[in-house]
Image (cartoon, coloured by chain):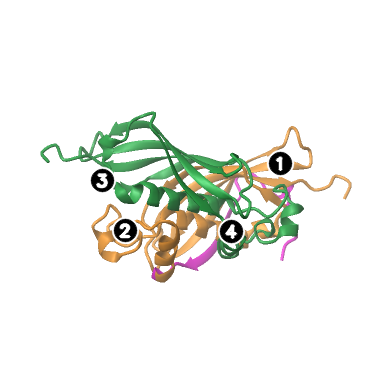
Chain colours: A orange, B green
Amino acid sequence: MTGKLYFEDFQPGAINEYGPRLVSREEIIAFAAEFDPQPMHLDEEAGRASMLGGLAASGWHTCCLMMRLAADGFILNSASMGAPGVDEVRWLAPLRPGRSITLRTTTLETRPSASRPEMGFVKMLFEVIDDAGVTVMTLSSSLIMRRREKSA
Amino acid sequence: MTGKLYFEDFQPGAINEYGPRLVSREEIIAFAAEFDPQPMHLDEEAGRASMLGGLAASGWHTCCLMMRLAADGFILNSASMGAPGVDEVRWLAPLRPGRSITLRTTTLETRPSASRPEMGFVKMLFEVIDDAGVTVMTLSSSLIMRRREKSA
């Protein structure tokens, strides 16, 4: 175990990987039934008739699985204070049942807050890649991280 | 009931509202436990100690609730073929348990596909507003909509 991660521990260019995590047909359908009940996320035949070419997870499900991989991977072991939002979510390829996904993070830039010296922003690229090597989703987000106490 | 919505039925400037939908403490905690187990989304006291100032839904939960409101509101009654992604998700204010949320959509622009004459892109702004009038989240996304058959 490494110690808790603070703003200063994130270096531009650093790449990390988390997972894998298996994605089952049952959870794809359960998620869709609750949050995104479009036929191509609920039914194999409807999926085949759609642009997805087969049953595939809701893009929002992929976002949520990404969040869980990031939480378990490093956020819960960090001084994260949250995030103001997300940019450029790109659903690049269908996420199929039975695939395992990995999360790759790249630290793009870090910037101390101008107005709040106790925190800084860590802009990261998040890439979700399946076990066939296909990148199914990318997005970027700036995490708010507490800075190490100067006096500590 | 109106007929099924096609690309041509979306007009720039059009505004619609869907909902309301009550968001319970139980579902906020259940979602967080599954997808975003950060303490401020699981526990009232941890929420008070965070930037959120109290228990609040995961921002991804707000995205998923938005998707469900949009699906029930118009997407399931449309010729939607999916969406390539999402831009500028902004989590502007905490979504608290016991609030009801409304989705407001604004059609920003529409554009026939240059390469695929059977479809077009409908760029929309999505705003999630709680029953105190607070905008808790905004995002934009381009939906892919089938065009009406010219010959129909």
Q: Earlier in the sequence, mark 3 or mark 4?
A: 3
**Mark 3 vs mark 1, CA separation in Å:** 48 Å
| Disc 3 and disc 1 in contact, CB within 8 angstroms | no
Q: Earlier in the sequence, mark 1 or mark 2?
A: 2
Which residue is denoted by mark 1 in the rendering?
A: A120
Q: Are marks 1 and 2 on the same chain?
A: yes
User: Which numbered circle lies on residue B24?
Assistant: 4
Q: Is residue A3 magenta?
A: yes
Q: Where is residue B27, by image quadrant? A: bottom right
Q: Which residues are magenta?
A: A1-25
User: Which callout, 1 or 2, points to the residue nearer the camera?
Assistant: 2
**Mark 1 vs mark 4, CA separation in Å:** 32 Å
**Mark 3 vs mark 4, CA separation in Å:** 32 Å
Secondary structure under tag 4 reads loop
Residue A63 relative to residue A150: left or right:
left
> Disc 2 marks which amino acid?
Met
**Mark 2 vs mark 4, CA separation in Å:** 28 Å
User: Which numbered circle lies on residue A138?
Assistant: none
Residue A71 relative to residue A113: left or right:
left
Which residue is denoted by mark 2 in the rendering?
A: A40
> Disc 1 marks which amino acid?
Gly
